[in-house]
Image (cartoon, grey):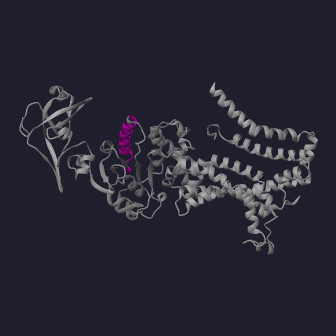
C-alpha cells in the first residue's frame, strides 16, 4: 500500500512540476491553429534567432567538451597546487546566477572595464557574437567535467597502466583505453551542455543588447514575443521549437547508447 | 633477462616505501617478493616496471640501465591484482592490444592471440567481454595479454589476491607449469608465505622498505636470518628469546629431561594435521602441531596436563643459528 503511495507521490510530483507546464506550452502553441504556429516560427526574425542559437551551440559544445575532458583528467589524474581551487571554480557557473555572469562580462568588456579598450580597436565583444559566445561557454562549462570526473575516479588507473606497460604512448592510452571507458559520461555531458547552450537566457540577454534580427537568440525571441509584442501563440510556438530540440538531443543519446550501459 | 635493483629509494611524502633496496633476480627465475602490506614489495615491482620512478638508485634489465625509461619501452609484461582488463574490448582485443599498438600485421596478430588463448586455456572465449568471465579466467586473460608482446620480464602484482582459495590454488600450480614452459624471468608479489614458497624458486623477504633476506624457500624456513623472517615464513612460538616451530614441539604424557609442564587449552582438528594450543606453567602460550595419528595416541583433552619439549629451537643474537637439541626417548 505504502509502496503505491510513494510511487503515486513521486509520479505526481514530476507530472505537476514538469509535464503539465511543458504540455500546456504545446497545447497553447497550436491553440490558434497549426498554420499560425508555423508562420510564427518561420518569420525571418525567428529563423535568424534559431540560426544564431544553433551557431552558438555548435561552437560552445565542442569547445567545452574538449576542455571539459582535459579539466576532468587534470582534476582526477594529476596532483598540483590549487587543484582544490580549480575544482571549486569549475562549479562556479552552476552556483552563479546567469544574470551575474552577464553583468560581469558587461562590466569587463564595457567602457571603463579591464578589457573595455578592445571596442576602440574595432574588436566588438558586447552587443555582438563574441560576447554572446563567451556568456554561453561560461554557463555551460561544468557539465562535461561533472559527468566525467566520477567515472574517471571509478575506473581507476590500472587499465591505463596496463596499456602503458603494453607499449602505448600517452595519447594511445587515452584514445584506446580512457576515452572508451568515459564515452557515455562524455555523451551525457554533451547533452546537458547542449541543452544549457540552447536554453541560455540570462547572461546572453545582458551581453547581447537584444538587437532584433542581429543578436537575438531563440530564448530571447520567445521572451520578446511574449513580453513586448504580445504575440503569445508565437512565443509558444518558438518555445515548442526549443523544447523539441532538447527532446531530440535526449532521444538521440538514448538511441545510440547500448542497453546495458543505460545511465 | 636478469634484473638488478641497486640502492633504490622511494618515498611517498613522509612515508619511506623503499630504503636502499638492492636485489638481483637471475635470468629465467621465478622470484617472489614477500612481505606484509606496507613492506614496499608492490612499490619495488612498480619501480621495476617503470610505473614509479625511484628517488635514487638504478634498475637494470639485462645489462641495460632502464631507470630513466618509461614503462612502455622496458619490455615488461605486467599483471595486476584486479586484472586491469580493458572492459570495452573482447578477450581477443585485450590479448591483441600490445601487438595492435606495435602495428603488427593482422594475420600475425590473429595467430599469436590464438596461440596464447590456447596456452591460458581460454580458446573459444575470444569473443566474450571481460564482464562475462570468471575471476580466474580474467586473470589468465591478463596473463596472455602480458605475454603477447614477448616481454623480457613478467611482473605479477598479487595476481591471485582477489580470487577465492580454490581457484588460487589451481592458478598457482598452473603458473608454475606455465613458467616451466615459457621460462621468462618472472617476479610475483605476494603477502602469502605459502604462495611464495609453493610458486617461487627464490624469495625476497621485505619489511618496512628493506630486504630482510633472500633465499630459496627451504633456506628461509630452515635458516631464517632474523626474527621477522622466522615469524613471517611460518607459524612460530616465541618463548622468551627462543623461537620454536609448532611442529618442533614434542608432547609427552610423562615428565622427562628438558620438559616443562603445560595444560591443553584447545585441540583443533584440521584433517591430517592436529593443532594443540597449550599454556605452559610459566604462563607462555604455545601451539604444537601433530599428525592425526600422534594426537590419537596421546588422547588429548582440554584441561589435561602434558609435558612439552622443543626438539629444535632458534635464538637470534646478532647472527642467528638454529640448534638441534639432543633427543632422549
Q: Main secondary structure of the magenta part?
A: helix
Residue B166: x percent and y percent? Answer: 38, 34
Q: Locate residue A104 relative to residue A71 in the image: left or right.
A: right
Image quarter hosting the N terminus of chain A? top right
Relative vertical location of residue B251 with respect to residue A206 in this rendering, above or below: above
Q: Locate residue B265 relative to residue B103 in the image: left or right.
A: left
Q: Locate residue B32 relative to residue A8 in the image: left or right.
A: left
Q: Is residue B184 magenta?
A: yes
Image quarter hosting the C terminus of chain A? top right
Number of numbered markers: 0
Residue in the picture at 76% in, 43% down:
A247
B70 or B115: nearer the viewer:
B70
Residue A51: x percent and y percent? Answer: 83, 54
Answer whether residue B224 is visible to the viewer in this image. Answer: yes
Give the residues in magenta.
Answer: B166-187
Residue in the picture at 16% in, 29% down:
B304
Relative vertical location of residue B23 with respect to residue B139 in this rendering, above or below: below
Quarter of the image holding residue B17?
bottom left
Residue A182: x percent and y percent? Answer: 60, 48
Q: Is residue A88 magenta?
A: no
B86 or A102: nearer the viewer:
A102
Amino acid at each position: 500500500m505504502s509502496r503505491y503511495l510513494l510511487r503515486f507521490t513521486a509520479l505526481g510530483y514530476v507530472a505537476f512540476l514538469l509535464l503539465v507546464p511543458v504540455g500546456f506550452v504545446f497545447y497553447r502553441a497550436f491553440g490558434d491553429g497549426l498554420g499560425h504556429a508555423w508562420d510564427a516560427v518561420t518569420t525571418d526574425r525567428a529563423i535568424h534567432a534559431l540560426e544564431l542559437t544553433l551557431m552558438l551551440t555548435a561552437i560552445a559544445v565542442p569547445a567545452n567538451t574538449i576542455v571539459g575532458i582535459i579539466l576532468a583528467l587534470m582534476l582526477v589524474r594529476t596532483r598540483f597546487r590549487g587543484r582544490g581551487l580549480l575544482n571549486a571554480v569549475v562549479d562556479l557557473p552552476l552556483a552563479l546566477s546567469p544574470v551575474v555572469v552577464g553583468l560581469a562580462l558587461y562590466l569587463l568588456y564595457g567602457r571603463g572595464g579591464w578589457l573595455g579598450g578592445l571596442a576602440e580597436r574595432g574588436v566588438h565583444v558586447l552587443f555582438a557574437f563574441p560576447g554572446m559566445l563567451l556568456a554561453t561557454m561560461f554557463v555551460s562549462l561544468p557539465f562535461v567535467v561533472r559527468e566525467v570526473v566520477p567515472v574517471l575516479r571509478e575506473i581507476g588507473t590500472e587499465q591505463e597502466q596496463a596499456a602503458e606497460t603494453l607499449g602505448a604512448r600517452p595519447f594511445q592510452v587515452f584514445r584506446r583505453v580512457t576515452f572508451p571507458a568515459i564515452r557515455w559520461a562524455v555523451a551525457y555531458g554533451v547533452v546537458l551542455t547542449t541543452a544549457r547552450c540552447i536554453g541560455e537566457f540570462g547572461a546572453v540577454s545582458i551581453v547581447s543588447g537584444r538587437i532584433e534580427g542581429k543578436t537575438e537568440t531563440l530564448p530571447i525571441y520567445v521572451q520578446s514575443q511574449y513580453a513586448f509584442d504580445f504575440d503569445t501563440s508565437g512565443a509558444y510556438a518558438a518555445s515548442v521549437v526549443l523544447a523539441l530540440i532538447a527532446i531530440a538531443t535526449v532521444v538521440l543519446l538514448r538511441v545510440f547508447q547500448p542497453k546495458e550501459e543505460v545511465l | 633477462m636478469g634484473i638488478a635493483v641497486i640502492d633504490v629509494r622511494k618515498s611517498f611524502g613522509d612515508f619511506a616505501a623503499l630504503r636502499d633496496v638492492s636485489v638481483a633476480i637471475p635470468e629465467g627465475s621465478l622470484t617472489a617478493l614477500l612481505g606484509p602490506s606496507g613492506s614496499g614489495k608492490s612499490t619495488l615491482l612498480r619501480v621495476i616496471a617503470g610505473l614509479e620512478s625511484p628517488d635514487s638508485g638504478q634498475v637494470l634489465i639485462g645489462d641495460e640501465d632502464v631507470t630513466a625509461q618509461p614503462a612502455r619501452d622496458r619490455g615488461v609484461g605486467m599483471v595486476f591484482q584486479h586484472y586491469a582488463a580493458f572492459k570495452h574490448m573482447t578477450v581477443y582485443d585485450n590479448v591483441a592490444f600490445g601487438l595492435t599498438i606495435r602495428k603488427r600485421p593482422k594475420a600475425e596478430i590473429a595467430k599469436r592471440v590464438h596461440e596464447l588463448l590456447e596456452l591460458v586455456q581460454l580458446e573459444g572465449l575470444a569473443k566474450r567481454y571481460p564482464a562475462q568471465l570468471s575471476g580466474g579466467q580474467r586473470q589468465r586473460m591478463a596473463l596472455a595479454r602480458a605475454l603477447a608482446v614477448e616481454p623480457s620480464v613478467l611482473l605479477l602484482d598479487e595476481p591471485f589476491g582477489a580470487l577465492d582459495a580454490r581457484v588460487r590454488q589451481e592458478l598457482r600450480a598452473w603458473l608454475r607449469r606455465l613458467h616451466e614452459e615459457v621460462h621468462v624471468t618472472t617476479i610475483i608479489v605476494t603477502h602469502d608465505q605459502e604462495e611464495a614458497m609453493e610458486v617461487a624458486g627464490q624469495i625476497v623477504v621485505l619489511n618496512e622498505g628493506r630486504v630482510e633476506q633472500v633465499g630459496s624457500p627451504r633456506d628461509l624456513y630452515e635458516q631464517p636470518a632474523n626474527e621477522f623472517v622466522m615469524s613471517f615464513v611460518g607459524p612460530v612460538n616465541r618463548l622468551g628469546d627462543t623461537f620454536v616451530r609448532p611442529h618442533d614441539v614434542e608432547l609427552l604424557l610423562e615428565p622427562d629431561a628438558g620438559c616443562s609442564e603445560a595444560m591443553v587449552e584447545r585441540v583443533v582438528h584440521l584433517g591430517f594435521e592436529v593443532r594443540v594450543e597449550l599454556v605452559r606453567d610459566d604462563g607462555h602460550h604455545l601451539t604444537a602441531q601433530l599428525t592425526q595419528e600422534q594426537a590419537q595416541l596421546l588422547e588429548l583433552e582440554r584441561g589435561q596436563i602434558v609435558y612439552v619439549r622443543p626438539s629444535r629451537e632458534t635464538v637470534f643474537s646478532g647472527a642467528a643459528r638454529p640448534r638441534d637439541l639432543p633427543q632422549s626417548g
